[in-house]
Image (spheres, helix red, strand yellow):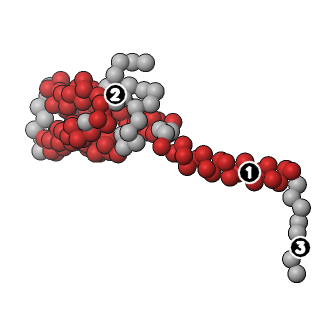
Amino acid sequence: MFTVRKFSKVGLFAGAALALAVAFGTVGSNNVSADDHGDRNAAMKSMGGAMKALGGAVAGGDASAAQAAAAKISATAAEIPALFKDGKPGANRSKAEIWTNFADFTAKANALKAAADSVAADAGAGKLGSDPKAVVGKIGATCGACHKAYRGPKV
């Protein structure tokens, strides 16, 4: 035999709140989360640190460290398109043009990866030379091309 239980007002409220949270949580999932922006920022800062390490390694004649720094830049560059997959600029320096011209944005990320791979190969073969500006400039030119097109002013 079935028994009917009475729901308390608190129980009904809690159930309704849970249902609303689930419903609005899925509707709001198209928004860019703070984690998405944090991941983007962390990746860009990581590449900036690797660029500094690369310059220092070249200046110090440390081909192994230069190769590692270039490899880190390459690996991060490969992740860039996925970091911007959400289609929302949010409250940062990302321009909306990233998503209106995503193919070009992705091509620029691929050019960055190719430049970093080239520097890593040169470092591995002992062909870097001793001019940090020239070596870092090979990669930096690709960074600048993307930043010029797709990064807005500081906010």
User: Percent position (x, y) of residue 71?
Assistant: 26, 43
User: Local crowd at mark 3 within 10 Å, few (<14), some, or many (≥20)?
Assistant: few
Tell me the element at label 1.
helix
Indicate which disc residue 95 carries. 2
- Disc 2 packing (10 Å; few <14; some 14–19; many ≥20): some
Give the quadrant of the C terminus: top left
Residue toward you, 112 or 23: 23
Q: Which residue is mark 1?
A: 16
The amino acid beneath tag 1 is Ala
Q: Are marks 1 and 2 in contact (CB under 8 Å)?
A: no
Towards the viewer: 143 or 18: 18
Question: Relative to 62, is 141 above or below?
Answer: above
Marks 3 and 2 sit apart, C-alpha to C-alpha, by: 60 Å
Quarter of the image with the N terminus is bottom right
State which tag comes first along the sequence, 1 or 2: 1
**Picture residue at 32% right of the left edge, 41% below the top:** 80
Three-letter code, disc 3: Thr
Q: Nearer the viewer, mark 1 or mark 2?
A: 1
Q: Which residue is mark 3?
A: 3
Residue 113 occupies quadrant? top left
Please state which amino acid type lies under the numbered disc 2: Lys
Instruction: Please indicate whether residue 40 sits to the left or right of residue 24 in the image.
Output: left
Observer-nearest of 36 and 22: 22
Q: Is residue 111 left or right of residue 83?
A: left
Pick whichever, 76 or 89, lies toward us.
89
- 16 over 52 or under it: above or below: below
Q: Secondary structure at mark 2?
A: loop
The alpha-carbon separation of the residues under discs 3 and 1 comes to 23 Å
> Residue 145, image x and y in percent?
20, 28
